[in-house]
């Protein structure tokens, strides 16, 4: 049996535990007119896009070898591209983090992050996968579906996202 690594723990933390805990705490202690779908979108955007992409971007910018060798199975020649990917992830992540405090950023962060994870997940579908890539594919597609559902639900409820 394979040991659960830091990558898997971070995915579960950022895509399940933090958004659900944040939603529950805010719904119980800070009662306002926001719907459950609105709170879920807020916390999934903050954590799933913001914290996840910001932390992944930092790791890619500071230590590109992990992404290059462990995920993409390439050599040192890709470090520059991996660092640039890290900078893009940091930027999207910052928008996701800020969206917790500035709701006007939320839709942009949710759509950009959701699409990013959707495209990344679909890329894994057409690529030869090992266990790590299967986990990445499932988690990427999961967060994509979550954002499609949450953005659509908020839109259909006539709520500002």
Image: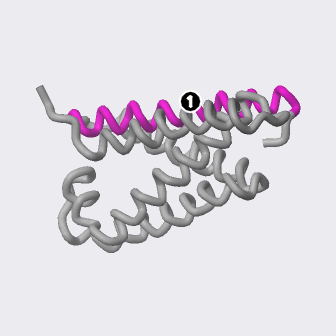
Task: Determine whether, in the image, residue 124 is placed left or right of residue 1.
Answer: right
The quadrant of the picture occupied by the N terminus is top left
Q: Residue furthest right?
A: 158
Tell me the residue at 41%/41% (across/down): 123
Secondary structure, mark 1, is helix
Q: Is residue 134 magenta?
A: yes
Which of the pair 83/33 is nearer the observer? 33
Q: Which residue is mark 1?
A: 145
Q: Is residue 61 above or below residue 97?
A: below
Residue 156 x/y as whole percent: 82, 27
Residue 115: quarter of image: top right
Which of the pair 138/29 is nearer the observer? 29
Q: Is residue 80 magenta?
A: no
Residue 3 x/y as whole percent: 16, 34
Residue 57 x/y as whole percent: 42, 62
Q: Residue furthest left?
A: 1
Q: Is residue 14 above or below residue 103?
A: above
Q: For the magenta stretch, what is the residue range?
A: 131-158
Q: Considering the whole magenta stretch, tell me its main secondary structure.
A: helix
How many tags in the picture?
Answer: 1
Task: Determine whether, in the image, residue 117 is placed left or right of residue 74.
Answer: right
Task: Determine whether, in the image, residue 117 is placed left or right of residue 4.
Answer: right
Task: Determine whether, in the image, residue 5 is placed left or right of residue 87.
Answer: left
Give the class, few, some or many, for how many residues have Cα within 10 Å of label 1's Cα (few <14, many ≥20). some
Tell me the residue at 58%/43% (across/down): 114
Residue 25 x/y as whole percent: 62, 35
Which colour style is shown?
Answer: one colour
The quadrant of the picture occupied by the C terminus is top right
Tell me the residue at 42%/58% (across/down): 55
């Amino acid at each position: 049996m394979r040991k659960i690594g830091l990558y898997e723990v971070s995915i579960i933390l950022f895509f399940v535990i933090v958004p659900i805990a944040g939603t529950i705490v805010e719904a119980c202690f800070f009662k306002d007119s926001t719907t459950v779908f609105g709170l879920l979108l807020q916390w999934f955007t903050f954590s799933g896009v913001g914290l996840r992409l910001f932390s992944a971007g930092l790791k890619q910018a500071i230590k590109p070898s992990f992404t290059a060798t462990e995920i993409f199975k390439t050599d040192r020649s890709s470090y520059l591209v991996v660092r640039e990917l890290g900078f893009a992830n940091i930027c999207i992540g910052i928008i996701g983090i800020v969206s917790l405090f500035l709701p006007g950023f939320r839709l942009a962060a949710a759509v950009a992050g959701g699409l990013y994870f959707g495209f990344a997940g679909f890329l894994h579908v057409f690529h030869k996968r090992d266990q790590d890539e299967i986990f990445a594919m499932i988690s990427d597609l999961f967060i994509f579906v979550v954002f499609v559902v949450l953005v659509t639900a908020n839109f259909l409820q006539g709520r500002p996202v």
